């Protein structure tokens, strides 16, 4: 989920904490718990510090160790301990427990979108994603807004207990829908290696990627119908260049974060452009996320870009900068 949604979730957990009589009967503790819930709800995303080492490092490490099972209690201890130093009169146990819940819900909800997390680190580097909800889910956001609007009229703890019951029911329905659709598609594409569903905001509508041994198929699933739009063959021009590009730092960073990176190679006047696009994130005109590698004709000069490209204009600017640079980075 996005940062703003996690902040809203933290406020919701702060309201839910009023169901705890120790919290509700202590205004000082209530304020400490609210602060802990908001910070704890965002703590796993503090891995943004990897940006200091570059975009590639952040992409490789985001939603990795910081979202793993061993990290969850550590984040709770760190956040609640910090708040306790600022507000030493607060009950530490209850502050810790509600902060811990906020941390857990952050990672739990991140499992349901298309990106997923490496929650099983250090035991497994596998990315786990349930493909159930979009990265920014308007229904979950509006549920919280409804809860906040009801606070002047009803007990805040009981109100958000109902709100979160509705949220978990919503997650169950969307997850069950995704499981059903994947099984349905597997019955038709029995040679599929993997089927990835990218959920829309509408329940039951998905962009779909179907990987086989020969290609990637792209389509849209809606109202029990799959519409295949196009496909990419796994037989790629300049296979040696593609294979060598995997050892490049930014390409390796991208490949560590997704199983759905696909290379396109284009020969230009000064060399070759190798596009490693994350197939999960696309518009009708271009892929919005990936790594681009420019290799000069003599194979000595390389320029790299990794990250999001939010418009065709930005896409053209990135390519221009890569092709017109003659120094290695």
Image (tube, helix red, strand yellow):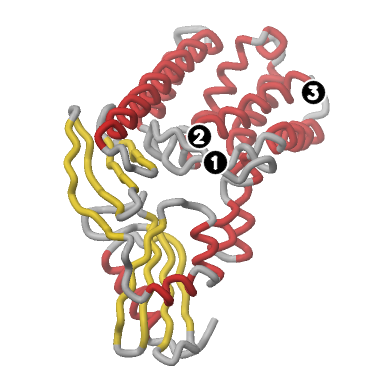
Specify whether 233 is left or right of 25.
left
Give residue 49's mark: none
- Please give the name of the residue rendered at 57% of the width and 16% of the height, measured from the top-left corner: 16
Q: Can you tell which quarter of the image residue 232 is in? A: bottom left
| Image quarter in which the C terminus is found | bottom right
Under tag 2, what secondary structure?
Answer: loop
State the separation of the CA atoms marked 1 and 3: 29 Å
Q: Local crowd at mark 3 within 10 Å, few (<14), some, or many (≥20)?
A: some
Q: Report which residue position mark 3 lands on.
A: 92
Where is residue 76 shown, x and y percent of the image?
71, 32
Specify whether 231 is left or right of 8.
left
State the separation of the CA atoms marked 3 and 2: 29 Å
Q: Local crowd at mark 2 within 10 Å, few (<14), some, or many (≥20)?
A: many
Under tag 3, what secondary structure?
Answer: helix
Specify whether 171 is left or right of 201.
right
- Please give the name of the residue rendered at 51% of the width and 53% of the height, measured from the top-left corner: 257
137 vs 173: above or below: below
For the residues labelled 3 and 2, say whether their Cβ atoms are less than 8 Å apart.
Answer: no
For the residues labelled 1 and 2, say whether their Cβ atoms are less than 8 Å apart.
Answer: yes
Give residue 111's mark: 2
- Please give the name of the residue rendered at 31% of the width and 45% of the height, measured from the top-left corner: 210
Q: Earlier in the sequence, mark 3 or mark 2?
A: 3
Q: Can you tell which quarter of the image residue 239 is in? A: bottom left
State the separation of the CA atoms marked 1 and 2: 6 Å
Specify whether 319 is left or right of 3.
left
Give residue 117's mark: 1
244 vs 223: above or below: below
Where is residue 139 shown, x and y percent of the image?
35, 27
């Amino acid at each position: 989920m996005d940062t703003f949604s996690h902040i809203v979730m933290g406020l919701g957990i702060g309201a839910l904490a009023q169901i705890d009589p120790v919290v509700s009967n202590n205004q000082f503790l209530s304020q400490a718990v609210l602060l802990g819930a908001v910070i704890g709800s965002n703590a796993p995303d503090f891995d943004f510090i990897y940006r200091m080492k570059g975009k590639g490092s952040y992409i490789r490490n985001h939603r990795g160790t910081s979202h793993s099972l061993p990290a969850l209690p550590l984040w709770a201890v760190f956040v609640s301990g910090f708040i306790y130093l600022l507000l030493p009169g607060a009950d530490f146990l209850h502050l810790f427990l509600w902060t811990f819940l906020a941390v857990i819900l952050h990672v739990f909800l991140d499992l349901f979108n298309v990106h997923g997390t490496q929650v099983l680190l250090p035991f497994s580097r596998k990315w786990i994603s349930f493909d159930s909800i979009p990265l920014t889910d308007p229904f979950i956001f509006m549920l919280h807004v409804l809860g906040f609007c009801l606070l002047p009229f009803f007990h805040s703890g009981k109100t958000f207990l109902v709100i979160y019951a509705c949220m978990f029911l919503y997650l169950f329905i969307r997850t069950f829908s995704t499981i059903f659709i994947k099984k349905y598609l597997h019955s038709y594409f029995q040679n599929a290696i993997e089927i990835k569903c990218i959920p829309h905001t509408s329940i039951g509508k998905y962009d779909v990627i179907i990987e086989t041994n020969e290609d990637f198929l792209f389509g849209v699933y809606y109202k029990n119908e799959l519409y295949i739009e196009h496909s990419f063959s796994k037989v790629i021009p300049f296979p040696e260049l593609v294979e060598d590009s995997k050892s490049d730092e930014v390409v390796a960073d991208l490949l560590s974060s997704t199983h759905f990176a696909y290379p396109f190679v284009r020969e230009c006047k000064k060399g070759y452009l190798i596009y490693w696009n994350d197939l999960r994130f696309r518009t009708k005109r271009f892929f919005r996320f990936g790594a681009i590698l420019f290799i000069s004709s003599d194979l000595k000069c390389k320029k790299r870009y990794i990250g999001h490209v939010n418009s065709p204009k930005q896409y053209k600017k990135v390519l221009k900068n890569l092709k017109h640079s003659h120094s290695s980075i």
